[in-house]
Image: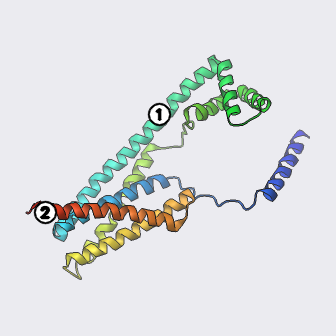
Amino acid sequence: MAGENSRRLIEVEEVESNINGGERPEEPWKAEYGKSVVYGGLDAIITSFSLISSISATKRSSVDVLVLGFANLVADGISMGFGDFVSSSTEKEAAAKERTVMEWDVRNHNGPQKMELLQQYQALGMDINDATTVVNIFAKYKDIMVDEKMKFEKGMLPPDDADKPWKSGLVTFAAFLVFGSAPLLSFIILIPFTKDESVKFTGACVLSALALACLGVAKAKIAGQKYGFSAAITVFNGVIAAAAAYAIGWTLRNVAGLQD
């Protein structure tokens, strides 16, 4: 009977919420490794294209661009992938350690822990009576209370056994290679058609812009942002980085007088 009444109450509240809440916002795209793909891909495109820009400014050949480009791409990809793995592993281990400490505090100093959680709920605007009820309920379930205090006091989610740091590192490495290859493809595809290095560089600019725009759209889909604005900002970021690299390469060759 109690369960039936609870179900009806929830249904009534949901109907009232639908009436008063307006149209439901669009949910962001839930990509398990979306962060690693965007993080690795964006860094790869900008790094690779910036390298191409600096090399092209010094009037090097396509062979130089490809050799230096792919060597740098693989080396940076390994570094990025391993860095993501280490970062994710450290974050997970730190959360597990913090949860162990928090669990000991909750089990051995329950009174002060309940008072801290009560004050935090009050700070969020919860009535003292409601806050007391919630805390007393959580106090019956130690694991839930530990997780709640982790979120409030440490700003950390409890460690998830399903998270695999090595997968994040592998995805970052793969994304770095795939997206970082985009600017270099122009120097491969156009080899049979032209020997003009400026044409190949222009092709690299176009491919880089397309790849950056795709990543910008993916980032917007994950974060629930506007596609056009996100793509434009991402491309602009790449343009600034590449322009700086090209300017430095041109300056070193033509102003500083660095020649082969």
Q: Secondary structure at mark 2?
A: loop
> Is residue 214 something that shows in the picture?
no
Which residue is situated farthest in the left direction here?
A: 260
Which residue is situated farthest in the front direction here?
A: 255
- Quadrant into which the N terminus falls: top right
- Quadrant into which the C terminus falls: bottom left
Coordinates of residue 58 in the picture (x, y in percent): 16, 66
Q: Is residue 163 above or below residue 97?
A: below
C-alpha distance separating marks 2 and 1: 51 Å
Coordinates of residue 43 in the picture (x, y in percent): 36, 56
Q: Are marks 2 and 1 in contact (CB under 8 Å)?
A: no
Question: Residue type at mark 2?
Answer: Val
Residue name at image x 68 percent, y 23 percent: 115
Left or right: where does residue 223 sit relative to residue 114? left
Coordinates of residue 205 in the picture (x, y in percent): 32, 71
Comparing labels 2 and 1, the label whose residue is closer to the camera? 2
Residue at the disc numbered 2: 255
> Is residue 107 something that shows in the picture?
yes
Residue name at image x 68 percent, y 18 percent: 111
Residue 93: give its label.
1
Residue 68: give its label.
none
Task: Identify the mark nearer the N-term, 2 or 1.
Answer: 1
Residue name at image x 17 percent, y 62 percent: 251
Question: Residue type at mark 1?
Answer: Glu
Residue 256 in which image quadrant: bottom left
Q: Secondary structure at mark 1?
A: helix
